[in-house]
Image (cartoon, helix red, strand yellow):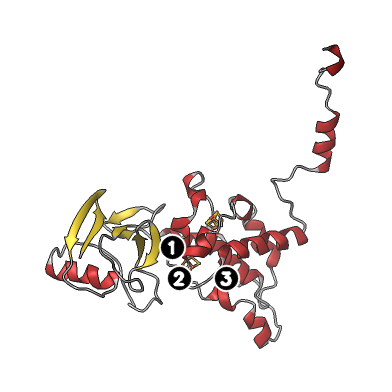
């Protein structure tokens, strides 16, 4: 079986003797038997740590969970700084999480029920694999976009009954956040944890409007009235 790996912007072909293995198994095989300098990340080997996410035939996948096939084309994730081969720089993650206040800021004394917990169950399963980030087309045009997993995590804390300061969280996501998403759904398709960031973003839009924020893509009535009354000097009867 032959696979291609992009290394230093060049496609390199490898012949793998193993059949019926995961992509991570194939990468281990190459490192042990063909080229020990190949760089890639892996951790738990069980789809839990999220560290082995790469592009397989241009789709984000966890190397430990997907089966490798003949002619597969493997590349590093997009929109992140490349360190070497399939290893990308993840230093921005902590910064993004802090900037977007994805933690409890003001603790409530409320007793948390099972029902309360269920509101944040799905979003809490995010393993920060970066697959959704890499699949998001907004980064082509806006590198400051907060991104799907950050917004999903913000919703997790907005829905957390232990948090009293919801408005502080909603405040941060109004710029380069929920209104910049195109709702394409790529993030939802690639998520290995079956999280649905697109729907989470729609929920955050609804909660923002309920809390007094406005959708910046909709013109205010005042502006529309002014626009409709604007005299262009054009007189159709003059023709
Ligand atoms: S739905 Fe929004 S956040 Fe998700 S990939 Fe598309 S543009 Fe990015
Ligand atoms: S939301 Fe899904 S795809 Fe995005 S980082 Fe979390 S686990 Fe990965």
Mark found first going from the N terminus, 1 or 2? 1
Seen from the viewer's position, the closer of residues 97 and 30 is 30
Asked which quadrant contains residue 42, the reply is bottom left
Q: Position of residue 52 (x, y in %)?
A: 34, 68
Q: Quadrant of the N terminus?
A: bottom left
Look at the image and tell me whether residue 211 can be seen.
Answer: no
- Number of labels in the image equals 3
Asked if disc 2 is less than 8 Å from ligand 2, the answer is yes
Q: Looking at the rendering, in which quadrant would you find the C terminus?
A: top right
Q: What SS does tag 2 mark?
A: loop
Report, in whole angstroms, how far the alpha carbon at label 3 lies from the one at label 2: 23 Å
Q: Is residue 136 left or right of residue 16?
A: right
Residue at image mark 2: 192
Mark 3: which secondary structure?
loop
Q: Which mark is residue 131?
A: 1
Q: Which residue is mark 3?
A: 103
Q: Counting other residues with Cα less than 10 Å from the Cα at mark 2, is it few (<14), some (14-19), or many (20 or more)? A: many
**Residue 10 % position (x, y):** 23, 49
x and y percentages locating residue 53 in the rendered image: 37, 65
| 113 lies above or below 30 | below
Give the CA separation, mark 1 to mark 3. 22 Å
Question: Could you tell which of marks 1 and 3 lies nearer the N-terminus?
Answer: 3
Marks 1 and 2 close (CB-CB < 8 Å): yes
Mark found first going from the N terminus, 3 or 2: 3
Q: Secondary structure at mark 1?
A: helix
Which residue sits furthest left?
Answer: 33
Image spot of residue 189 (x, y percent): 50, 64
Q: Residue at x 30, y 59 (%)?
A: 74
**Under 8 Å from ligand 2: the CB of mark 1?**
yes
In the drawing, does residue 75 fall left or right of residue 238? Answer: left
The structure residue drawn at horizontal position 82% and vertical position 17%, both measured from the top left corner, is 233
Q: How many residues crowd around disc 1 within 10 Å: few (fewer than 14), some, or many (20 or more)?
A: many
């Amino acid at each position: 079986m032959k696979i291609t790996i992009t290394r230093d912007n060049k496609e390199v072909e490898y012949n793998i003797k193993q059949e019926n293995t995961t992509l991570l198994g194939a990468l281990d095989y190459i490192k042990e038997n063909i080229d020990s300098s190949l760089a890639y990340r892996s951790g738990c080997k069980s789809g839990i740590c999220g560290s082995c996410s790469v592009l397989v035939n241009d789709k984000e996948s966890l190397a430990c969970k997907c089966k490798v096939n003949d002619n597969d084309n493997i590349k590093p994730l997009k929109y992140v700084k490349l360190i070497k081969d399939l290893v990308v720089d993840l230093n921005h993650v902590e910064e993004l999480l802090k900037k977007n206040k994805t933690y409890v800021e003001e603790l409530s004394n409320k007793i948390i029920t099972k029902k309360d917990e269920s509101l944040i169950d799905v979003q809490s399963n995010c393993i920060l694999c970066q697959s959704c980030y890499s699949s998001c087309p907004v980064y082509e045009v806006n590198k400051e976009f907060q991104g799907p997993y950050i917004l999903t995590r913000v919703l997790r804390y907005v829905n957390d009954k232990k948090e009293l300061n919801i408005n502080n969280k909603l405040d941060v996501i109004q710029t380069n956040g929920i209104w910049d998403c195109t709702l394409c759904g790529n993030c939802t398709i690639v998520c290995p944890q079956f999280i649905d960031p697109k729907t989470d973003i729609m929920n955050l839009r609804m909660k923002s409007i309920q809390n007094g924020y406005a959708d910046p893509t909709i013109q205010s009535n005042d502006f529309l009235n002014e626009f409709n009354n604007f005299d262009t000097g054009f007189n159709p009867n003059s023709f």
